[in-house]
Amino acid sequence: MKKTIFRTFFIWEYEKEEKWLNKMSSKGWQLVNARLLKYVFEKGEPNEYIYRLELLDKNPKTSESKAYVNFLDEINIESVGQCQNWIYLRIKSSLGNFSCEDRLHSNLTRIIRVDDLFQYARNMTLCLVVASFAFLLICGELNLSTSLGDFLRGFFTGTGIGSSVMSLIMIPRMQKNRKKIKQYIRELSVNE
């Protein structure tokens, strides 16, 4: 018996997504396919598999990523889905868990990559804000009073305000990520 669930997880919620997948496994629903927002489960034994998400360096379709996924398959870690550079992995519970040290390295790598994406988004947002307000200053100096000028002023005002709000929303999320990075580094140094 199969069951399809549509659910949204944001990029920074990968731990929450993993917990949800493992909770579904504990109820006997095993993930067999995952894509953007879509999860396909098949009824099986409770806790048959343990799930983990991994963020690849490159697109899963590249030969380097394919070789890595093939290597995982050789050591009984199965890839059951992908979304952008994220892959959904599972291992039979009877074979053991993903190792603790690998888990810490993986978590640190993922959180740093997520932080890099936040930095990129922040920089793009800042560029939009600066470009919007620069355009508004130019429009003011040129005294554009046509309907096109009014439209452009409105558009760039909205873009500037929207980008500013987006930056303010991202700041707390970025701070949480930085704390997680420090936490994982401390855990790694204690384990080594």
Image: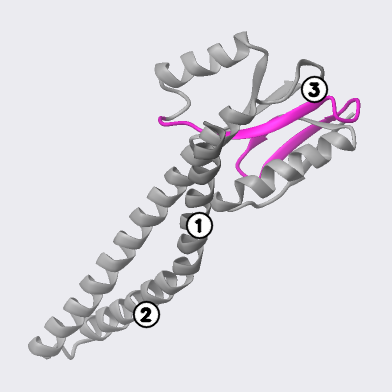
Relative to 90, is 122 on the left or the right? left
Nearest the camera: 120 or 4? Answer: 120
**Residue 83 visible in the snapshot:** no
Q: What residue type is labelled 2?
A: Ile
- Magenta stretch, residue numbers: 33-58
Measuring from the top left, give residue 160's x and y in whole percent. Answer: 32, 77
Front-most of residues 22 and 134 = 22
Instruction: State whether the magenta stretch is mostly helix, strand or loop.
Output: strand
Disc tally is: 3
Side of 57 where 5 appears, left or right: right
Q: Earlier in the sequence, mark 3 or mark 2?
A: 3
Residue designated by label 3: 93
- Label 1 sits on a secondary structure element that is helix
Q: Quadrant of the N terminus?
A: top right
How many C-alpha atoms fall within 10 Å of the one at disc 2: few (<14), some, or many (≥20)?
Answer: some
User: Looking at the image, which residue is at 89% across and 25% down?
Assistant: 44
| 108 or 150: nearer the viewer | 108
Spatial CA distance of label 3 from label 2 is 50 Å
